[in-house]
Amino acid sequence: MILFAFELLLLYENRTTGSFRPLFWLPPLFLVWANLDIQFVYGILLLVLFVAASLLQDLARRLAARGLRQEGGPVSLANARLLATFCGIATIITPYFYHLYGGFLASLTSTANRYLPDFNAMGFRQPRDYVLMLLTMAGFLALGLRRSRDPFQIALLSGCAMLSFYAKRDAWFAALAAIAVIAEAIRDKGGTPDTDDTDVHLKRARNRQLLIAGGLSVAILVLAAVLEIPSSNEVLLTKVAQSYPVAASNYIREQQLPQPLFNSYEWGGFLTWYLPEYPVAIDDRIDLYDENSIAQYFKVMNAEVPYQAYPAMAQARTLLLQENSAMGEALRTLPAFRVAYRDSVAVVLTKP
């Protein structure tokens, strides 16, 4: 999210000033991004959209198309090629070379995605879903009030909205895009000084805005850290124990229950950190598991097939499941399993 936001900042800086210099930061940005997160591909798609919109505006200007209002300076064809080449090279300077693109496409089109909670569409059962919808609507309203025909902003907000409302894990796309569009509308509404020192005034005003925004961001982060980050490991575990199987994990460790362990998908990441001596059966690093295995897991958990159909569960000698899960309720009634531990969060089952 931070890297995508930084890319947006650089692109809007180019559109505002017409200078190509901010875009010099994009190749090193993608070099870092590609080595940290496979979703750098979304950043490449954003860059492609930006270059295509800029070239379209440049073509419209050359053809003197009166119906297309120019908003932001375009990137020349030569600069666009140079920029795309260097950014593309930066994304393959990784241990995986160009294979990250194939991995991204495979994860995006996997048939197992329909079973993964993060890939589900928004259910509009939480206030944040409605807040995102209102923020997105405000972004489109800002474009409408300006009578904007800017292809970049229209495509940016539309594309990010489709991504966000299709899969809730990508909700941040629409939020960042809407904030960028609204901020651009506020900046334009402020107007520009009508003097010979316009550039100087604009530069000073933009520097002031950056300082204010930076100061506010730092203050918000510090405040959030003070309010949300626990003061000690004990306080952290007490808070985490409300949703994660801290006590059940302690019991498994103290009693040295036999491996292999079978766990709920939602707890895989937590157990990897808190109970590292017990390798998890599944976690949210979906790239580590083939899609058939993921699909079979959720079929078993949803009681679509018998538990023996999933090898990790059939072979497990210790099972750590959510207390209110249907699978936990079903297995504890079978003679093949014994309830070793149970609390309000988790249930631990073992095989004799």
Image (spheres, grey):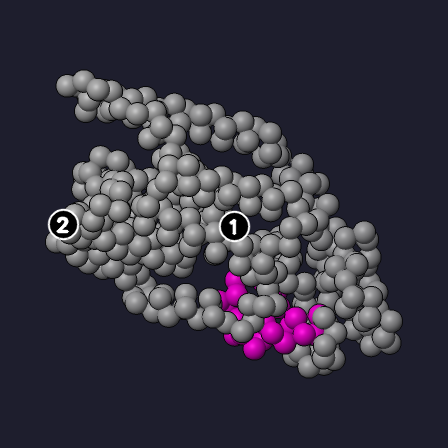
Residue type, numbered disc 1: Ala
| Marker disc for residue 62 | 2
331 vs 116, left or right, is right
Q: Residue at (34%, 53%) from the top-left corner? A: 46
How crowded pointer 1 is (Cα within 10 Å; few <14, some 14-19, many 20+) is rated as many
Q: Position of residue 184 (x, y in %)?
A: 36, 35
Q: Is residue 75 visible?
A: no
Q: Quadrant of the C terminus?
A: bottom right
Direction front: furthest residue? 66
Q: Residue at (71%, 41%) from the top-left corner? A: 238
Q: Residue at (27%, 52%) from the top-left corner? A: 53
How crowded pointer 2 is (Cα within 10 Å; few <14, some 14-19, many 20+) is rated as few
Mark 2 element type: helix
The residue indicated by pointer 1 is 171
Magenta span: predominant SS is helix
Q: Position of residue 349 (x, y in %)?
A: 78, 66
Q: Residue at (56%, 61%) from the top-left corner? A: 119
Counting residues from the start of the chain, the first of labels 2 and 1 encountered is: 2
158 vs 268, left or right, is left
Residue type, numbered disc 2: Arg
From which residue to which does the magenta span run? 279-301
350 vs 259, left or right, is right
Q: Nearer the viewer, mark 2 or mark 1?
A: 2
Q: Is residue 297 magenta?
A: yes
The quadrant in which residue 281 appears is bottom right
| Marker disc for residue 224 | none
Q: Position of residue 170 (x, y in %)?
A: 50, 53
Q: Position of residue 268 (x, y in %)?
A: 61, 60
